[in-house]
Amino acid sequence: MNLLIDIENASGSDDVPDDEHIHRWVKAALQALPTEQQRSSAELSVRIVSEQESQNLNHRYRQKNSPTNVLSFPSELPPELNIPLLGDLAICAQVVAREAQQQQKTADAHWAHMLVHGTLHLLDYDHIDDGDADEMEALETQIITDLGFPEPYNDTFYQSPKRAPQNS
């Protein structure tokens, strides 16, 4: 798979994964898709943001006045353009670090989960209703465990993506 990721750290934090890890985790999400959804190439942007920028984006696009872990902005290009642009992810470094600590996860495990979760949103997966949430959670769990991390929803902090703090 040909994968192009534009990565920008605008968070002011040095405690973020390197480009190689980000690339690996996004690629794992794309390669785990059912065959009919797989792509030969994909492009996306990952912007690592501060809490203030996350709050501003969350307020502007979701009418929620608080920072959040990951926001997904799928590309809205017409299919006839045949451009492999998936969209953009905005991930808040401080929120991800805080959640990892609260959920007693390693930083890498939570970063991987947020990148996988956000990438799946770019591909039209969601957790609005229970059926979609179950499908997305199962796929996320498969991807995360295949990467060698523990199951992302196997704890008492939350039980499913619908109730999870993933606000993408």
Image (cartoon, rainbow, N blue to C red):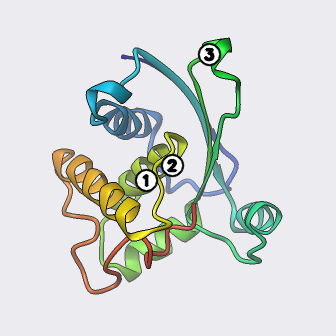
- What is the spatial separation of the Cα atoms under label 2 and label 3, in whole angstroms? 18 Å
Tell whether label 2 touches label 1 (CB within 8 Å).
yes
The amino acid sitting under disc 1 is: His
Residue at which label 3 appears? 83
- The residue carrying pointer 3 sits among few (fewer than 14), some (14 to 19) or many (20 or more) residues within 10 Å by Cα, namely few
Which x, y percent locates residue 34? 28, 33
Q: Indicate the position of residue 50 as horizontal and vertical percent values.
A: 69, 61
Q: Which mark is residue 117?
A: 1
Badge 2 density bin: few <14, some 14–19, many ≥20, Cα 10 Å: many
Q: Tell me whether the residue at label 1 lies in contact with that at label 3, contact meaning CB atoms closer than 8 angstroms.
A: no
**Residue 154, image x and y in percent?**
21, 74
Q: Which residue is mark 2?
A: 121
Most extreme residue toward the bottom, as rendered?
A: 156
- Residue type, label 2: His
Q: Earlier in the sequence, mark 2 or mark 3?
A: 3
Q: Is residue 5 visible?
A: no
Q: Position of residue 88 (x, y in %)?
A: 64, 40
